[in-house]
Image: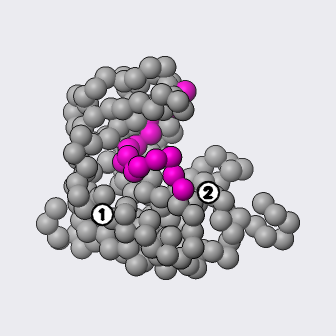
Amino acid sequence: MIANHPSLKLFFALWPDAPTRDALARLQAPVAGRHTPHDKLHLTMAFLGQQPVDALPDLLDILESVPVSPMRLIVDCYGYFTRPRIAWAGMTAPPPELLAMQADLIARLEAAGFSTATHGAFKPHITLAREARGAPPDEVAAPVVWDVRELVLVESVTATGRYRPIDRSHPAELGAPI
């Protein structure tokens, strides 16, 4: 943080509701490592890192402009990122709507001048554990069904280690078919 220019560590994410979060937490059972706290389980759509506070209005405009179609994610597999030693859960077949929404979000962020440098191609996943001691099993015993209806702008609060949702997109119509 530069003096007199406060910043926030930000990212866009899909934020599960309580029952989905509970189901995702159950996927941590066969994973050895430092488990992600229950309240921090999410799917990152775009990591922004440190951003000046005065960028918030533009980011909130982007949040509201990204169409969020109701979609169903079937979290049915485990994965492992060797270099950072991260065990995760994901989808063997991410829905095209998810990939399209993430691409649209990235395009809007780049058009507004935000850096979207990432660690390679988008690999939708939920981090289950850091400092993981080996890869988890390939398949999830009981897949988690996650009905996505909103996108969230989240602050990673460095001082507390907590995640704080700043704002949510208007939820997709709840009666819409998934």
**Residue contact between numbered discs 2 and 1, judged by CB atoms under 8 Å:** no
Disc 2, SS: strand
- Using the rendered view, name the quadrant where residue 92 is placed: top left
Q: Which residue is mark 1?
A: 100
Query: Which one is in front, 135 or 108?
Result: 108
Choose mark 2 or mark 1, whichever is in front: 1
Locate residue 26 relative to residue 44 in the image: left or right: left
Locate residue 102 relative to residue 172 in the image: left or right: right
**Looking at the image, residue 141 lies above or below residue 118:** above
**Looking at the image, residue 65 lies above or below residue 30:** below
Disc 1, SS: helix
Where the C terminus falls, by quadrant? bottom left
Residue 165 visible somewhere in the drawing:
no
Distance between the alpha carbons at the discs numbered 2 and 1: 22 Å
Q: How is the image coloured?
A: one colour
Q: Earlier in the sequence, mark 2 or mark 1?
A: 2
Expressed as whole percent of the image width and height from the top left, the position of residue 155 reads: 58, 59
Q: Which residue is mark 2?
A: 49
Expressed as whole percent of the image width and height from the top left, the position of residue 25 reads: 38, 37
Q: Which residues are magenta?
A: 117-131
The residue type indicated by label 2 comes to Gly
Query: Which one is in front, 95 or 165?
Result: 95
Expressed as whole percent of the image width and height from the top left, the position of residue 78 reads: 33, 32
Q: Residue at x 39, y 57 (%)?
A: 14
The residue type indicated by label 1 comes to Ala
Where the N terminus falls, by quadrant? bottom right
